Each structure stands twice: as structure tokens, then as C-alpha cells.
Amino acid sequence: MTTPDISIKLAGIPMKNPVMVASGTFGYGPEYAPLVDLAKLGALVVKGISPEPWRGNPTPRTVEVASGLINAIGLQNPGAEGFLRDYLPFLRKFDVPVIVNIWGRTIEGYAAVAARLSQAEGIAALELNVSCPNIKEGSKSFGSNADMFKRVVAATRAVTKLPLIPKLAPDVFRIGEFARIAEAEGADALAITNSVPAMAIDIETRRPKLANVTGGLSGPAIRPIAVRLVWEAAKAVKIPIIGIGGIYSAADALEFFIAGASAVAVGTANFLEPTTALTVADGLRDYLARHKLGSIHELVGTLAC
Amino acid sequence: MQLETVSIIEHRDYGAGYRLLRLAAPQIAPQVRPGQFVHVRIPRLEASVLRRPFSVFKAENGELTLLYKSVGHGTSVLAVAAPGEIVSLIGPLGNGFPLDLPADRTPVLVAGGYGMAALYLLARRLPQKGVVFAGGRSTQDVLCVEDFEALGWKVHIATQDGSRGVRGLVTGPFDAWLAEHRTNLAPEFFACGPNAMLQEIGARAIAGGWRAWLSVDRHMGCGVGACLTCVVKLQDTDGTWFWARSCKEGPVFEARQIRWNGEDDEA
Ligand SMILES: Cc1cc2nc3c(=O)[nH]c(=O)nc-3n(C[C@H](O)[C@H](O)[C@H](O)COP(=O)(O)OP(=O)(O)OC[C@H]3O[C@@H](n4cnc5c(N)ncnc54)[C@H](O)[C@@H]3O)c2cc1C
Ligand SMILES: Cc1cc2nc3c(=O)[nH]c(=O)nc-3n(C[C@H](O)[C@H](O)[C@H](O)COP(=O)(O)O)c2cc1C
Ligand code: FES
């Protein structure tokens, strides 16, 4: 039997395999390049970029909890110009689609960074991080308010021809509603999901373990939550979904495909094992062969229930 | 920097509550410079999503030796790993201490806790001999004294309970030595230990016009510069500050670079 084909085309982007690395867990490329062949990744999603450089939160910024990590990095980044100057030239040397995760503190901020990055050569798509507060409108998160979410997707859609991938927040009442809004506003794919709002307390000092008090939980602890969100969203829309949340192995990734994801991204697992995305891709190939499936497409959304 | 799967050759108590872990690491060991560290995936550490950072005590003959204390979940699980077991390492990481010390300088090492293990390789690799100041709560916390003495270095000890050396903080014997030698020697400081100690040593270096290389201890996520967990505030030339990653640009910084006492510095 021929080896199964795990290459995909997602939002028009050809990928060698459907396993990407998730924003904020793989830096901007050079950090892991000595350890991982970047050209073997399905795609590389860089850490969130805002219009201007941003310092992020005070320390401590992360805390390990049972089967997870809570982070409150606070979106520290070099800004659009810094990214284009210091990192994109490096990334362009590798044969790998580069997806830039973007965020703003206002709707205008999102549009500004999307417009600026769209002028650059070598960016395959923009991923919209909506899990951050709107400083103009009462610090409500862009990702948990349907009206604001609609406006931010529309505003970025209006300024870019690049494939647009809104990343849906997990802390919403009905994910299907957000998925439909994104699709209606012209999103090309969805990323599901971001880290889950969480906190941890030092019981001796009665102080929060993170300087920011709260943060986002990622890792194995959130995988069942993310699988459910992908399943719900996949029922609501036709655009492809990138499943994200606690993926450490091919078995973990397969749950997402079966639930309806067309691709996956590996996040926190990179910290423990930087080559996780590559071993997940290999495991997918083995699974397809074992189940006599010719391609990954034959598996997507095949949950029997 | 690379990933290497290594096996445990030796794992035993080393005194002062520390354990020695000797690993066959033919790829990483020859690359290690003093002050660098390795990020260790502790075998059979369930429900844990991070590696643990450890300084390198010795790196020779394709082997790496670490000295560590069991202080929590990860190090307690590590403590029961047996010879022959496989451990995954990422390393060497960080910038390490500068080794290009002018010949007329006297290296002055100051350590607390695992700092003695982190500074030993420096003593070993520096061309000139110097002095070491070791501090701890009690004799139970003072590590590696004999290792430094075997290299011909003079070790000054201070313990808070007076159970070994001078009673009090390490800055006691350090200041006494400095007062005696500041006119006839040109010291350069290298320190690894609690933040309060690093700050004290740094302040003396700045006041005296000497250099102090301080190895800071920050919690780490990725260890390779990707996650921005381990950041330290550094002084910018224009009076403002910026974040540096202690896993990448550090963990060693010169005293003048670090901005202590920020409202958000770790205790
Ligand atoms: C550059 C560097 C070099 C180090 N070298 C040594 C060494 O040579 N010998 C030695 O005994 N220890 C060393 N440490 C400290 C060592 O990393 C911690 O003792 C260890 O991570 C504790 O893990 P745990 O799971 O047992 O503790 P827990 O408290 O259960 O760990 C919880 C989390 O906090 C982190 N953490 C806890 N204490 C520290 C600490 N002091 N520094 C950084 N992270 C911490 C852990 O890595 C883990 O992510 C070094 C730390 C750094 C940053
Ligand atoms: C340290 C860290 C930083 C992150 N930074 C970003 C970011 O800048 N933008 C973003 O959209 N998601 C960010 N994320 C979320 C991840 O991309 C991912 O959605 C989440 O961690 C869940 O996947 P995982 O469980 O595989 O890590 C970050 C996650 C971590 C752990
Ligand atoms: S530990 Fe991740 S950047 Fe330093």
C-alpha cells in the first residue's frame, strides 16, 4: 500500500502536513530552529504581533499546575515593524508557511497591524487573536462579545487579502454563534481554541501565583474542552477548523480531526518536547495506514454519534 | 544548543542535602561553558508540562554532572531515577560567564545554595586562581567546599546559625576580604545565589568600580527564548528599561545591566 497522504490545503495554503505549531509557544522561528527542522512543520504560527511594540505583564508570568500551564505573558512582542525587520527575513529562508497571529487594543489597532503585514512578502495568513481586552470599550474581551467580535473580523477583513483565521476564545456561551459570525464576515478558517481563563493561589502567602492574578490555562488539562468546542463549531460552519488545545501525541490530534478539525496546532507540548509536531505528523501517517485511509480528509468530522 | 537523549551513569547523595547526577552526554558535554545550564525532562514526571533547569557542575570526558536539591515535585521524582535510565536534555543553554578575564584580575566567586555547583566549572576553567565566598543557613546548605579547595582556591564560609565558618551572611567575610585587599588586588566578581545576595554583591561592585557577573534564578518555561516566562528587567542606555530573557541573554548579567527593585521583581 502507498503511504497515506497527509498534505493538506488549508484556506488556500498548501501544507506538507496538517500539524502546525501554535502562537506564543514557538517564538518567531529562530528560538527552536536549532532543535526542529522548521521546513517539516505544517505551518509556523508566530507569537502575537500588535501595531506597536508591547512590554507585556510583570513576572511571574507562568505557573505550572497539574497537567497544565497558566500563562499571563501579556502579549509581549516587538510590534509589526520589529517583526518584519528582525524575524520575517529569517523565516523566509525556510520552506514553511508563516502565519502571523495579530492583536490590537482597539479595532483600529487590529486593522492597522493587518494592513501593515499584508504589504510584506512571505506571510501565508493572519490569525486573529481576540482573547485580549478592548481598552476603548470597557476592557471587554473582543472574543467573548459577539458584536465586538463581528466588528473586529470585519475590520481586518476589509484591509487584507491574506487568508484570515480568527482564533475563537474558549470562554463563550455558544461557540457556534462566533464561528458563524466569522464565516459570514469572510474568515477563511477558524483556530479553536485559545488558553482558558484560570488562576492559581499560593496558600501560604494567600497571593496569586501570577503577577497578573489571572492567566490562560493550556496543556493536557484543556484538551477535552477544546475537542468539544471544535465539535460544536464544526457543526455550525463549512470553513475549515484548526484544532488547538493540549495536543501531545497523534492520538490527541486524532480526536480533533474526528471531531471536525482539518488541521491541528501543537502549543504547550513544545516546551516539554520541541519535536512534538513532527512526531504527531508521523503518527497521523501511521494511523491512516493502519485504518486504510488514503488521506487525512477522509477522517475529518467522522465522529460516529 | 541541541536535544540529546542521555543515560544516567551515577546518581547519589553528595552531602548538604544535594544529589549528584552524572550523565553520559557526548554531544552536549563538550559544548558547555561555565554558567550555562541544561533543561532536563525528568523521567516519569507525570502531569507536569515543563522541563527543569539545572546548572552544570562538571562537563568532561563526554559526561555532564549536575548537583541538585529536592525542593519540590520535579526534583523529588528526579531523585529516584536509577542509573541506566534515560533522560532528555536540551543544552547547553544561556550565555554563561565571561572567561576572558585580564591576567591581573582576581576572580572572586560568591555563592549561595546551588550557586557553588554553578560556579565550580568557572573556577575550573579560569586561568587564574581566586577566592570563593559561600553562604547558607547552616552547614547543611554549604556545598562543594572540598571541590574548590582541591583546585587550590581559598573558600570563606558564612552560615546564619554559625554551624560552619563565620556566623552571619556571606557579605560579612566578603566585605572583610574586600577591605583588606581592595588596594593590592583588582577583583572581578562572579555570583550565583538568592536575589538579595546578588543585589548586595552588585551594589558593592558598582560602588567600587569593579565588574560583577550575576547569574539570576528565574522560573523557566521553554528554556530557549520562545515563551518569555523568564524575563529580567535590564537598564537601557536612555534611562528606560527593557526585558531580557534569562534563558537566552542570561542567566548571567553584569550588575550594571540589571534593574532591581522594580515593582514586579520576583522576591
Ligand atoms: C539557570 C538555573 C540553574 C539552576 N541550577 C540549579 C542547580 O544546579 N541545582 C539545583 O538544585 N537547582 C538549580 N536550579 C533550580 C531548579 O531549577 C529548581 O530547584 C527546580 O526547577 C525545582 O523543580 P521542582 O519541580 O522540584 O519544584 P517545584 O517548586 O515543584 O516546581 C514548580 C515549578 O517552579 C519551578 N521552580 C521552582 N523553584 C525554582 C527555582 N529555584 N528556579 C527556577 N525554577 C524553579 C520549577 O521548574 C517548576 O516549573 C536552577 C535554576 C535556574 C533558573
Ligand atoms: C506561553 C504561551 C503564550 C501564548 N501566546 C499566545 C499569543 O500570543 N497569541 C495567541 O493567540 N495565543 C497564544 N497562546 C495560546 C496558544 O497558541 C494555544 O492556543 C493554547 O496554549 C492552547 O494550546 P495548547 O494546550 O496546545 O498549548 C499562548 C500560549 C502559551 C502557553
Ligand atoms: S524560558 Fe521561555 S523564554 Fe526563557
Image (cartoon, rainbow, N blue to C red):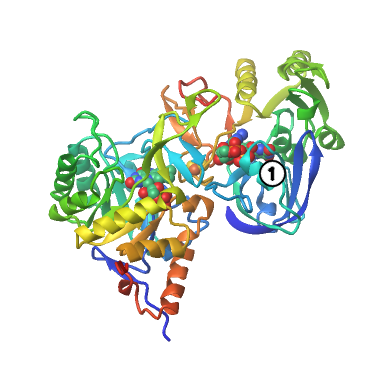
Neighbor class of circle 1 (other Cα within 10 Å; few <14, some 14-19, many 20+) is many
Q: Position of residue A290 (x, y in %)?
A: 45, 78
For the question of whether residue A304 can be seen, the reply is yes
The residue furthest front is A305
Residue A123, relative to residue B240: is it above or below?
below
Front residue of A242/A107: it is: A242
Q: Residue at x 30, y 56 (%)?
A: A230
Q: Residue at x 80, y 23 (%)?
A: B157
Q: Is residue A256 left or right of residue B93?
A: left
Q: Which of the pair A237/A142 is nearer the observer?
A: A237
Residue at figure coordinates x 43%, y 65% from the top left: A40
Quadrant where the N terminus of chain A sits is bottom left
Say which residue appears at 62% left-offset and 29% top-offset.
B214
In this view, the residue in front, B11 or B98, is B11
Q: Can you say whether B184 is above or below A277 in the image? A: above
**Which residue is label 1 attached to?**
B56
Please state the horizontal and vertical placement of residue B238, each as a whole percent of the image. Answer: 41, 24
